[in-house]
Amino acid sequence: MKYSQLGSNLRVNVLKMFIRITILTTGCSVQAQDGTYELKNKNGSYSYISLIKKQKHITAEIFAWWNTLGAQTGSYYGTGILADRQSVLKSDENDPDCTVRLKLINNVLHAKFEKCAPDHLTEDFNGMYTKISDATAGGYKVTSEKSFLYSEPAEKYKQSVYLIKGDTVTLNLDRITKGNWIYIYFKSANGKETSGYIKLGDVKKI
């Protein structure tokens, strides 16, 4: 009887542990969905999608580069409701006929553009986007006491210039790179502009 009770308690504890792990894993997966996703075509063109998810609401900013002599680019900004991991974005800034459909599965984002030629987004940019960074386009605040700037995203390119805690910077979607570095723009109180790479861990999204 005692052994039976012990086995029963063990099974209950294992079940509780499994439930906790499942909850933690699910929470991490949802959080990991925020970030920037990239699609690269064989002709050299590429597209970025910066995605922020808050419960069922998503905000997406899209930048596409055509790799043409005229350096043509496309852009889109919209919001949507996520249902069954899918969403159709709506925008107050882009052509009303342009439809952007997104499907989000962990760190992979499927995108489909319909009638978005006026915004320079065509079927060439349909497909699977892979997550390249946790960073998303927009404003950030420096959280480190000192955040040094780098000319390139590597320690050996460290400069003497640095930002201090509380400074606000801007990250543009077309300058997001892979990994834990971001290329930021900073404007001081006297109007002086500075730009360069800093570590993503030195800032927090505003």
Image (cartoon, rainbow, N blue to C red):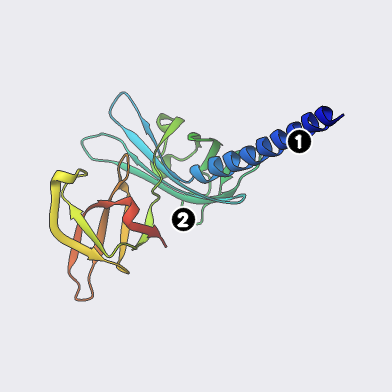
Quarter where residue 126 is shown:
top left
Query: Sequence-wise, which precedes: disc 1 or disc 2?
Result: 1
> Above or below — where is 92 with respect to 86?
below
Q: Position of residue 87 (x, y in %)?
A: 59, 42
Q: Position of residue 76 (x, y in %)?
A: 43, 48
Q: Which residue occupies the extreme top position in the image?
A: 42
The residue type indicated by label 2 comes to: Glu
Q: Quadrant of the N terminus?
A: top right
Residue drawn at x 32%, y 59% as measured from the top left:
170
Q: Is residue 140 left or right of residue 58?
A: left
Secondary structure found at label 2: loop
112 vs 57, nearest the viewer: 57
Q: Quadrant of the C terminus?
A: bottom left
The residue type indicated by label 1 comes to: Val
Residue 145 tag number? none
> Above or below — where is 135 with respect to 68?
below
Q: Alpha-carbon neighbours of circle 2 within 10 Å: few (<14), some, or many (≥20)?
A: few
Residue 12 tag number? 1
Q: Which residue is mark 2?
A: 93
68 vs 147, nearest the viewer: 147
Quarter where residue 68 is shown:
top left
> Above or below — where is 147 with respect to 120?
below
Residue drawn at x 33%, y 51% as measured from the top left:
200
Can residue 70 be seen in this snapshot?
A: yes
Q: CA distance from mark 1 to mark 2?
A: 54 Å
Q: Position of residue 18 (x, y in %)?
A: 66, 35
15 vs 206, nearest the viewer: 15
Disc 1 + disc 2, Cβ < 8 Å: no
Q: Position of residue 88 (x, y in %)?
A: 58, 43
